[in-house]
Image (cartoon, rainbow, N blue to C red):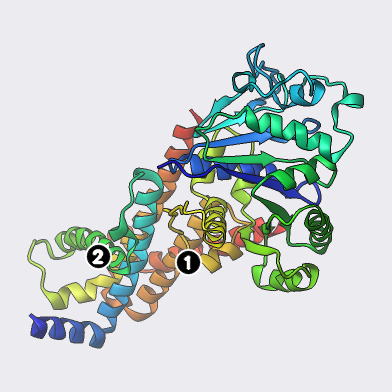
Amino acid sequence: MRRKRLVINVVSGKGGTGKTLLTAVLAEILGNNNVRVLVIDLDVFVRGLTALLYYHKGEAIQLTEHEKAPVSEYFIYPTRRGGKKQNLAIEHYRSFDVVPSVRMVNELLPFQNIMPDSRDEAKAILKTILASVPDEYEVILLDSRAGYDELISATHSICDMSICVTEDDNISAITADNLIEQLRQDSSKPVFILRNKVRDSVKSMDNIKSAFRLSNVGFIGDIPFDIDVLNSFGSSTFWDDISKSMYKEALIEAWNELSNKMKLEISIKSRRTSPVFFKQAEKKLGFLSLFDRLIFINGITLGIAGLFLYFINNEHAITFKYISNTIPLLIAVFGIFMSIYIVFKSGKK
Amino acid sequence: MSQVEDAAVDKVINTPTLLFTVVFAFISGHLWSYTIIAFFTTKERDILSSILGKTVLGLIWFAVASLIANLIVNKCFYVGLDKLVTLLPSIIFYSIFIQAILFTVLVFIDKKKVKK
């Protein structure tokens, strides 16, 4: 049985919070769990989502067929588009579909006229776009630009809920706080906070209590800082690296929290297992890449086993012609040294 | 059956080396479980995620290593418990060492495969 269509607005108080990437990965997660997802890139200026998905190594490619309309067309020609469903440009990407913001990533647009002058005008444009979306989609994610304007206000009014992506520093908390305050004045639609790139979730919880004074704003989770996402961003291994990352696991938990709070009945199961034995410990090691975390764990394990062998059971140690019983001690020390070196090397970066 | 279980648990608890082996079997099994789930399967494997499953996986790995070690040291397939217990710390250490090398190689191969 098809679920009722859900429109989720993803916003942030300032740029650089990782909102666009988070939107794309969330769409991928839902798409891989048999949810029909459409992501609409409403940021026609920065067009971050469109660039993230389609701009590879500097080539400019035609994203849409000529007769299909990307988001910018609805802003440039608001009276011409009568909401005919077949005109909307919908492109398939991995497990979800995308409405790009522009026809070509480097397309020049007439910025002096493009943005709506009022909230009502923005609402009308958005309703036309949404009316053009085929009924098959169960979840529509609106990737909005950072900050606040008439368009952000309008998207919050017409969506089912907004997710405000922020980081765990005080500046992000203040800008998110201001944005949420503004959105609450525009509409009673629920707003949920999702914090990204969190390095210390225990310490950061105090930031939530002090910076977010609004008692009816929901909190759906923390996405830990994960160096693998930073390192592989834009590379050919990006989606494979994401599939093994803490980032994806935390995003699934946040989605499940949202699903429980809003009774969406779209729960996702995370298959990820952590190489480090405790997830809280792995979050502390987010500054290490997955490979470094594996080396760290193996080094510590080797160290403990080797020290045990040398100091407790040395007289029964297996030795070979060219391998004396001090070799395990040397390997153990090397393993511990490697683990410490990796932590300090990555910590300095 | 419960008498056998009680005797086995008693033996493990009272022999530090065996207790050490069970703990390290879990650690080794956890790392094997991670490797299998991350690199070799897309299906859910609940048994690999449980404590018992991981410990059994580790014990299987140590059993293979024990057989080889026993052949090298005692030059026979017969395994006596007392002799095995004396060899276990070495077996665990070398098993983990080989496992660490295998992990490193696997991750490198996976990275190269994805890049292609």
Q: Quadrant of the N terminus of chain A?
A: top left
Q: Depth check: A105 or A27 in front?
A: A27
Q: How many marks?
A: 2
Tag shown at residue A300: 1
A185 left or right of A99 in image: right
Query: For the point 28% across and 68% down, which residue is it?
Result: B52
Residue A110 rendering spot, x and y as whole percentages:
87, 21
The three-letter code of the residue at mark 1 reads: Ile
Q: Camera-side residue: A294 or A200?
A: A200
A125 to A179, vertically: above or below: above
| Residue shown at the point (81%, 31%) measured from the top left | A45
> Residue B56 — which label?
2
Q: Quadrant of residue A118?
A: top right
The residue lying at 62 percent from left, 59 percent from top is A224
Is residue A128 toward the left or the right of residue A258 in the image?
right
Q: Of tags 2 and 1, which is closer to the observer?
A: 2
User: Horizontal and vertical percent for residue A269?
Assistant: 43, 54
